[in-house]
Structure formats: structure tokens, C-alpha cells
Image: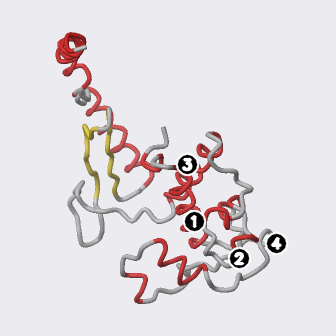
Amino acid sequence: MKHFVTALVALVLPLQPLLAAQPLQPAEATAIDAAVTKALKETGVPSAEIAVVRDGQIVLSRAWGKPSETLTQPDAALPYQIASNSKQFLAALLLLLENDGKIDLDDRVSKWLPELPDGGKITVRQLLSHTSGLQDFWPQDYSFAAMERPVAPMDIVRRWGMKPLDYTPGTRWQYSNTGFVVAGLIAEKAGCGRRASLA
């Protein structure tokens, strides 16, 4: 067995450079720069940030344009407000989990979060289609002080998900960030570690 392990190490060590992430080639960097510059010019979008990941390693992280009225230089270290862009990725993750047999979109929320009072009335599908009846924790027409502080997902559920439903699930549509927070918690529980990757 000792000789087998030694032979295996001897075979793998020379392959290490091949297993590492391939760096971005100059032609690739030029093509990315041209595409982003063109997109910003044609769309009027003020800024963009691109990251290229290969084999789990970032090989390019770069910003273009003007981040804001007060910040005029691009900076890849600046955070972007992604808002609801992440909802489509959460929905895709839940579909992958359903494909893997780990969840069913017609599961009742109470299967995953039994502490949610009306979870037995709401399905995962209704969370994703904004038809759950859960009150939105992030109003679209005003701002309040609590919105400016970081908060854990379960704290959002405790504050907003425990309230009476705004309507019977499935009977109307109402945008609900709270529903997607609940869906995210379900994905974490069902995913068993898959949440970091949609692959």
C-alpha cells in the first residue's frame, strides 16, 4: 500500500500545474474590455464589474465606468447593490434541487420551516411566484432606519413572516422579498452544501 501511495503522489505532482486555473490570456482580456466598453457606450449604463472564475479561482476582477455621481473612478473593490438580481439564481438553485430530488416546488413551507405560522398554507412555488401572501419586508415606496442595518435571514422571518398573511396564498400576486428570504432558507436546508454552486 505504501508503494501505491508513493506512486500515486509521483504521478499527481507533475500534474499540479495542469490542475491550476489557467490565467486569462491577453486576447481574452482585450475581448472582454472591448465588449464591456461597447455595452456601456450603447446602453448608457454608467458602470460594470466583471469577474472571470476558472477552476474556482478569480483570474480577472475589473470595473469599468463611473460608479456614482460622487465616485468617478472604476474600482473592482466597490460593492454593488444587486437588489433583486439574485432572485433568478435562487429560483434556478431551487429548480436544480428539485431535479436532484431534494425538494419539490409543491412542498409546503412548513416541511422546511415549521416555525412559520402559515407555512402549511404556502408552497415553495408560491414563494417564487410572489403569490404566498407573506408581507414584504422591503417596501417599494419608502425607507425606514432598520433597512440600513445588516440583518440575518431568520430575523427577517421572525419579524415579517410571523405576521398574518396579506391574502390567502395563491389568490393574488404581490411582490414579496420576505418570500424569497424564506425560499433562500429552504434552499440552504435542502441543498446540504450545494448553495455555493449552481453547477
Compute the Cα span from label 4 to label 3. 26 Å
Look at label 1 and name its amino acid. Answer: Phe
- Label 1 or label 2, whichever comes before in sequence order: 2
Look at label 2 and name its amino acid. Answer: Asp
Compute the Cα span from label 4 to label 2. 15 Å
Compute the Cα span from label 3 to label 2. 24 Å
In the displayed structure, does residue 184 sit left or right of residue 125? left
**SS at mark 4 in the image:** loop
Look at label 4 and name its amino acid. Answer: Thr
Mark whose residue sits in front, 4 or 3: 3
| Picture layout, residue 40 above or below residue 114 | above
Q: Residue at x 54, y 54 (%)?
A: 90
Compute the Cα span from label 4 to label 1. 18 Å
Q: Say which of 136 and 11 sits in front.
A: 11
- Label 4 or label 3, whichever comes before in sequence order: 3
Residue labelled with disc 1:
180
Residue labelled with disc 3:
93
Q: Say which of 2 and 170 sits in front.
A: 2
User: Mark 1–mark 2 contact, CB under 8 Å?
Assistant: no
User: Mark 4–mark 3 contact, CB under 8 Å?
Assistant: no
